[in-house]
Each structure stands twice: as C-alpha cells, then as structure tokens.
Image: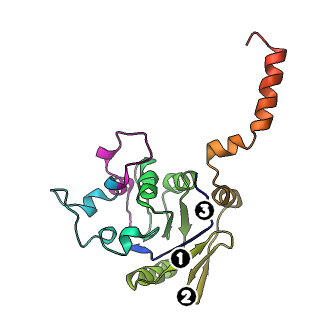
Amino acid sequence: MKKFDKLTSIPAPLPLINIDTDMIIPKQFLRTIKRTGLASGLFYEMRFDESGNPKPDFVLNRAPYSSSTILVAGNNFGCGSSREHAPWALLDFGIRCVIAPSYSDIFFNNCFKNGILPICASQEVVDALVQDGENNKEITIDLEQQKIVSGNVVYDFDIDPFRKHCLLNGLDDIGLTLEKESFISTYESKCAQDKPWL
C-alpha cells in the first residue's frame, strides 16, 4: 500500500448527501477482484450518458477536477452495500482523500485498508472546502500534523492513532502481518522441528 504523508490538490467538490456505493461504482463493474481498471466505472451513471459519452457538467469530467486527488462530499458518503470496489475505484481514479461530514462505517473502514484517508469534518469546514474547490484553490492535507491547510486557514482533524500509523507507513493488513515476519519464521521453524509430522 502506498504511504500517505502530505497531499496537495485542488479539491473536487461533490457536495451531495447519501452518495452510496452503487453510485460510486455501479454493480456491472463488480465482476473483477482486481483493484485496477475500476476508474472508468467511478460515478459511471453521473459521469457518462446512455451512449457512454462523458457528461461535460460532471465535476470529475472537468479540469482541474479530473486530476484532483481530494474529493469533498456531503453527509453519509459511502452508504449502501459494503462493496470494497468503491474505495478501489476512487483510488484507481487517483483520489487519496475524501472529506465529508460523515460516512458509512464499512466504507470508512475500507478506505483505510486501501490507502485512502477519509476525514470527518464539520459541515462548516466542508462548505468552506467546497468553495475552495469551486474557486480552484489548492489545499494541503498533512496527516502527520492532522491538519487541512487552505491558504492561511488551518483546520484540525481527528484520526485513530493506529490508522494514522498504518497510512503513514503504507501498511495494509498484509503489511501489518509481514512486520512480524521474523516471529512467524521462528515459530514455523520451531514447529517444524517439534512436530515434523505436520
């Protein structure tokens, strides 16, 4: 998993409430277990018309938001089914941070497991960051300091220390396990000697 430290981007404003996982990545794109190639299905029904042509008025189809790495969204982001393809699609598109007032628990947890930082911010802060995005103003996410920096304005955010450690060090569940590789190898060697029949 890619490490997360600082991230600077013009945020893509998508201040809709109750964006569910089927809106993020519709069901027809769930036929793969690969984490790549899903960007083309991200927000498919909002991004494309019935003929598959990009809708010019959708935020992620317009510069500079088409290359944004930060998404600012509305309340209850990621609600609906528990599909992990939703954070996979965001990440494949290039989104490394989502800022919203609230999230579905499962989606929130899946973001951390895939290297995306979901920040919970007050509606007032979200509204200000949406305005920054609409004004093409860059913001910086500083995970180490737990700050969102917008010009001279700084917003603090909370994050669980363990999840912060994992993002800063690029550790998913497999990476966390491999941190104990020496202990695992020692155990396996001892087990092979003590129980050779296994």
Residues in magenta? 14-39
Q: Does the magenta portion include 15?
A: yes
Q: Earlier in the sequence, mark 3 or mark 2?
A: 3
Q: Circle 1 sits in a helix, a strand or a loop, which is it?
A: loop
Classed neighbour count for the residue bearing mark 1: other residues with Cα under 10 Å, few (<14), some (14–19), many (≥20): some
What's the distance in space between the residues labelled 1 and 2, CA to CA? 19 Å
Q: Is residue 190 above or below residue 42?
A: above
Classed neighbour count for the residue bearing mark 3: other residues with Cα under 10 Å, few (<14), some (14–19), many (≥20): many
Q: Is residue 96 above or below residue 11?
A: above
Which residue appears at 50% of the width and 82% of the height? 124
Looking at the rendered structure, the kind of residue marked 2 is Gly
The residue carrying mark 1 is: 122
Residue nearest the observer in this picture, 184 or 74: 184
Q: Is residue 171 above or below residue 61?
A: above
In the displayed structure, does residue 161 sit left or right of residue 15?
right
Looking at the rendered structure, the kind of residue marked 3 is Phe
Residue 165: x %, y % from top left: 69, 58
Q: Circle 2 sits in a helix, a strand or a loop, which is it?
A: loop
Which residue appears at 32% of the width and 59% of the height? 43
Q: Residue 127: in sight, yes or no?
A: yes
Looking at the rendered structure, the kind of residue marked 1 is Ser
In the displayed structure, does residue 138 sit left or right of residue 45?
right
The residue carrying mark 3 is: 4
The residue carrying mark 2 is: 151
Which residue appears at 43% of the width and 42% of the height? 34
Q: Circle 3 sits in a helix, a strand or a loop, which is it?
A: loop
Residues tagged 1 and 2 counted as in contact (Cβ below 8 A)? no
Q: Earlier in the sequence, mark 1 or mark 2?
A: 1
Q: What sort of colour scheme is used for the picture? A: rainbow
